[in-house]
Image: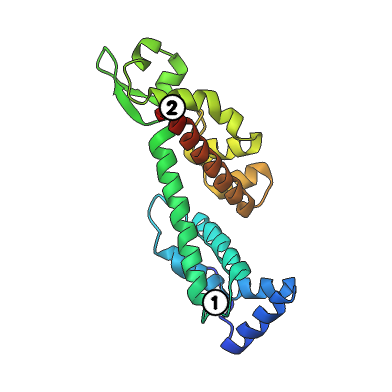
Amino acid sequence: MKTFKKPLSPEDEKYYLAKYKEGDIEARNLLIEHNLRLVAHVAKKYQAPEQDPDDLISIGIIGLIKAVMTFDSEKNNRLATYAARCIENELLMMLRSRKKLTREVSMYEKIGIDQEGRELRLMDVLESEPFDVLENLETQKNVQFLRECIGDVLNERELRVICERYGLCGRQERTQREIAASLGISRSYVSRLEKRALEKLRAEFEARFGENDA
């Protein structure tokens, strides 16, 4: 079970916020460390069987870091109140991005039935390239986009992280911890790579399809 440092007293919090405002990076780190308990508390609200608790904590920490770096004591009473909102916003953005990506580009999504009555998945379409079937599928636009664009939008490491996180491109779905171990990097770095890749894909989807629909 993880143990977290106790929250700072209002006086200590005010002191370290002032020190960080003067450029003291160690003061910033202390503010983050003493608010990790808050990250765990907020992340707990979003726990579900399909969610890795460590992933939620990693994303929540990003929100906490943003909160500490942007907190304005003249506009807000307590850092914890402001940070809780930032943490929750970060988690919600991640969950929405993940849901959207899964809905639009999941390689295992059932997209129809072939002439013999068998279920078709995006993976089946990509592997066999049955263009006569593709012409009759509503998801043809997404499938074609995925094939043409995903390798160009993401760099090699981002592509590997996304494929392994979501079970795309014939890879088995894995946790951030497993991917980090295989790549020899930290789990928090995997989390940043995943977030950046999702943002790139979302932007490319909106740009590509927005142009087509205009």
Q: Residues within 10 Å of mark 1 (few under 14, many from 20)?
A: many
Name the element at disc 1: helix
Residue 42 position in % (x across, y down): 45, 67
The residue at which mark 2 appears reads as 212
- Image: 3 above or below 143: below
Between 210 and 138, the one lying in front of the other is 210
Figure quadrant of residue 108: top left
**Residue furthest toward the top?**
132
Q: CA distance from mark 1 to mark 2?
A: 44 Å
Left or right: 31 in relation to 45: right
Residue at 43 percent across and 30 percent down: it is 107
Depth check, mark 1 against mark 2: the one in front is 2
Ranked by sequence position, the earlier of labels 1 and 2 is 1
Residue at 64 percent across and 35 percent down: it is 155
Numbered badge on residue 17 = none
- Image: 198 above or below 7: above
Residue 65 position in % (x across, y down): 60, 65
Dot 1 and dot 2 residues touching (CB under 8 Å): no
The residue at which mark 1 appears reads as 79
Q: The C terminus appears in which quarter of the rendering?
A: top left
What type is the residue that disc 2 sits on?
Asn
**Residue furthest toward the left?**
117
Left or right: 90 in relation to 135: right
Figure quadrant of residue 154: top right
Name the element at disc 2: helix
**Residue 42 seen anywhere in this rendered image of the structure:** yes
What type is the residue that disc 1 sits on?
Leu
Residue 170 position in % (x across, y down): 50, 28
Figure quadrant of residue 119: top left
**Residue 167 seen anywhere in this rendered image of the structure:** no
